[in-house]
Image: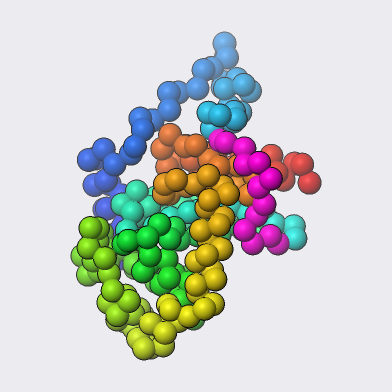
């Protein structure tokens, strides 16, 4: 089985087994002519998103609207969301900057948060991001909760994708990676993120989606709001 079909199969299986934490949002109310009313189509604070007091982008870039995904490689919901998010990313204009933030929640989350930043320092994220989800959730080639992967196990996996295992493990435990993990933790805390996957738009809005598709609908609306305000 190739990588992309495997992840798509995983998404289908998770959906069939009730992976979603909450039920789908009801169909929006419509006007008399059958079109969605402006009020029903808009996003609402407290229902669709939460304002983040004093929130700032994690990696601000001039002229860009930041969309952060807080994720965990060991999270099955994130594995389900990944193909949808990747498809969404491919359709975005140049002013949208997707930033992935691996959640360092301790335990089995921690090795893979360090691995993400080590891979990023070696230019390997694009090549390995989907492969890590596949290795954990489909192929079972990497430990999944409650087992905790060792740094050596993670480095051996990345060695199959172009990294030197010893160098990769060294980078996982480097000061540079530790600083990035700490920065991710600080961003997650100040944004009120308490689960994964979770989206944060321009540091200002924490998305409250009823499903993966609904999450991206809200993200699009908030991105449009930020674009219009500039």
In this rendering, position of residue 68 left or right of residue 79: right
The residue at the far right in this view is 230
Q: Could you say which quadrant of the image residue 148 lies in? A: bottom left
Residue at 31% in and 52% down: 76
Vertical comparison of 228 with 186: above or below? above
In this orientation, does residue 45 appear?
yes
Residue 8 located left or right of residue 45: left
Position of residue 44 measured from the top left corner of the image (x, y, whole percent) = 59, 28
Q: How has the structure been colored for display?
A: rainbow
Rendered residue at 50%/22% (across/down): 28
Please state the horizontal and vertical placement of residue 169, each as a whole percent of the image.
38, 82
The stretch of residues the image draws in magenta is 49-61
Image point 34% across, 37% down: which residue?
21
* Residue in the picture at 56% in, 47% down: 191
| 27 shown above or below 216 | above
Name the image quarter holding the N terminus: bottom left
Instruction: Report the front residue among 111 and 161.
Output: 111
Q: Is residue 53 magenta?
A: yes
- Indicate yes or no whether the magenta region holds residue 154: no
Query: From this viewpoint, is residue 162 visible?
Result: no
Q: Is residue 42 above or below residue 62?
A: above
- Residue 14, how many percent across, how many down? 27, 46
Q: Residue furthest top?
A: 32
Specify the principal SS of the magenta part: loop
Q: Position of residue 38 (x, y in %)?
A: 63, 23
On the rendered structure, is 221 left or right of 62?
Answer: left
Residue 202's place in the image compared with 229, above or below, is below
188 lies left or right of 140: right
What count of labels does the image hold?
Answer: 0
Q: Quadrant of residue 26?
A: top left
């Amino acid at each position: 089985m190739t990588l992309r079909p495997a992840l798509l199969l995983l998404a289908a299986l998770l959906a069939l087994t009730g992976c979603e934490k909450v039920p789908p949002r009801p169909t929006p109310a419509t006007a008399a002519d059958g079109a969605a009313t402006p009020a029903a189509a808009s996003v609402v604070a407290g229902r669709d998103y939460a304002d983040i007091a004093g929130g700032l982008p994690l990696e601000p870039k001039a002229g860009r609207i930041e969309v952060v995904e807080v994720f965990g490689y060991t999270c099955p919901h994130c594995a389900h969301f990944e193909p949808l998010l990747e498809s969404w990313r491919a359709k975005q204009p140049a002013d949208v900057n997707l930033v992935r933030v691996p959640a360092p929640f301790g335990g089995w989350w921690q090795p893979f948060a360090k691995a993400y930043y080590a891979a990023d320092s070696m230019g390997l994220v694009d090549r390995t991001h989907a492969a890590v989800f596949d290795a954990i959730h489909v192929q079972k080639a990497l430990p999944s909760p409650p087992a905790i992967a060792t740094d050596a196990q993670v480095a051996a996996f990345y060695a199959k994708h172009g990294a030197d295992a010893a160098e990769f493990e060294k980078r996982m435990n480097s000061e540079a990676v530790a600083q990035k993990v700490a920065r991710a933790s600080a961003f997650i805390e100040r944004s009120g993120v308490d689960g994964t996957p979770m989206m944060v738009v321009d540091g200002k809005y924490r998305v409250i989606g009823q499903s993966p598709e609904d999450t991206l609908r809200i993200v699009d609306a908030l991105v449009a709001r930020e674009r219009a305000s500039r």
